[in-house]
Image (cartoon, grey):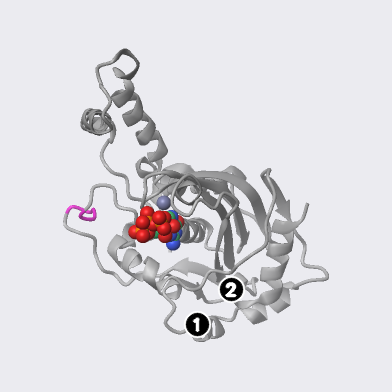
Amino acid sequence: MSFTRQLSEMSASELNDAIDDTNFPQAHILSRGRNNSVCSTSSTSGTSSLADRAQASQPEETIAAHPGTPLEDIVAPVATLAGNQRPRLILKTNGSTPDSDGHEKCTFHHDLELDHKPPTREALLPDMARSYRLLLGGLGENPDRQGLIKTPERAAKAMLYFTKGYDQSLEDVLNGAVFDEDHDEMVVVKDIEMFSMCEHHLVPFYGKVSIGYLPCNKILGLSKLARIVEIFSRRLQVQERLTKQIAVAVTQAVQPAGVAVVVEGVHMCMVMRGVQKINSKTVTSTMLGVFRDDPKTREEFLNLVNSK
Ligand SMILES: Nc1nc2c(ncn2[C@@H]2O[C@H](COP(=O)(O)OP(=O)(O)OP(=O)(O)O)[C@@H](O)[C@H]2O)c(=O)[nH]1
Ligand SMILES: [Zn+2]
């Protein structure tokens, strides 16, 4: 199945229903990483061999191991490729169609319709600025005092920037940087900075993302992993959904044997207000394919993520 065909076959409502917050499988609790983004590749010697991984990720076992878990409604391993022992993960579709206008009901929905590209949001600036002006009034401020005259427009532009991921589609961001390559060892890009907006309080959460995948004869331009993080972090989010969306997008881009994503976030809604736990960190992970089914592969990824 070609990449373009997969995009056109995806149903946003199907994906969103299957990967919603209530159905999300248990997140793994992990130890802390570090500050700067580092790209690593790893060989399998001494840890999980190619044969081990292939054995651990037979299609039947993968499906049977997690009956009813929603991510398997979305990604599934397909038959072994010629000359490659590892089943490749793809996004599943059931042929259902999107809404008649091709979009969900809300204007900028947060689902997994990865190719969704709304009409220009610049047109929303005047309405947003008017809302911020009302907000200033609501705070008891005088929106016409000198320092605040341009604030509604500035704030509207800033909010548009914080949510610019709604304007990006996976296909545009990838820009064709998917390369045929006979490489079947783990690729990890770690400590990718992330800034997002908590959808419950409209305040930031920020942190870092580590992504690993096991290629099946296709590799992704390295910067594209960081760009995928941008698409989904620059939206109103919860950290759990952000983690899943990144994993699903990487799956869609290169149909690897597995994808692993770990996100470590600091939520300002828990720091500046509310429980005010200034040192708390939230760690979420999504493990797909061989990373979910083979403890050695998962361990190899976590060792790379946690190494200096
Ligand atoms: N699971 C999850 N929860 C989040 C995220 N960001 C914020 N929240 C939580 O959303 C919840 C909203 O709870 P409410 O009780 O409705 O709101 P609240 O009164 O402001 O809650 P407090 O933050 O406890 O003061 C809080 O528990 C937040 O910590 C996230 O990314 N994931
Ligand atoms: Zn919040």
Using the numbered discs, state the Cα–Cα distance from disc 1 to disc 2 in whole angstroms.
Answer: 10 Å
The residue identified by callout 1 is 66
User: Within 10 Å of the Cα at label 1, are there few (<14), some (14-19), or many (20+) other Cα atoms?
Assistant: some
Identify the residue at image location x=54%, y=45%: 194
Residue 141 vs residue 59: left or right? left
Quarter of the figure with residue 284: bottom right
The residue identified by callout 2 is 292
Which of 90/143 is in front?
143
Rendering coords of residue 100 (x, y %): 16, 57
Which of 213/127 is in front?
127
Residue 114 vs residue 144: left or right? right
Identify the residue at image location x=48%, y=54%: 275
Q: Which amino acid does label 2 sit on?
A: Arg
| Label 1 element class | loop
Which of 218/31 is in front?
31
Rendering coords of residue 282 (x, y %): 55, 58
Q: Give the range drawn in magenta.
A: 101-105
Q: Does the magenta stretch include residue 183?
A: no
Q: Are marks 1 and 2 in contact (CB under 8 Å)?
A: yes
User: Within 10 Å of the Cα at label 2, are there few (<14), some (14-19), or many (20+) other Cα atoms?
Assistant: many
Mark toward the start of the polypeptide (1 vs 2): 1
Task: Say if residue 4 shows up in the picture.
Answer: no
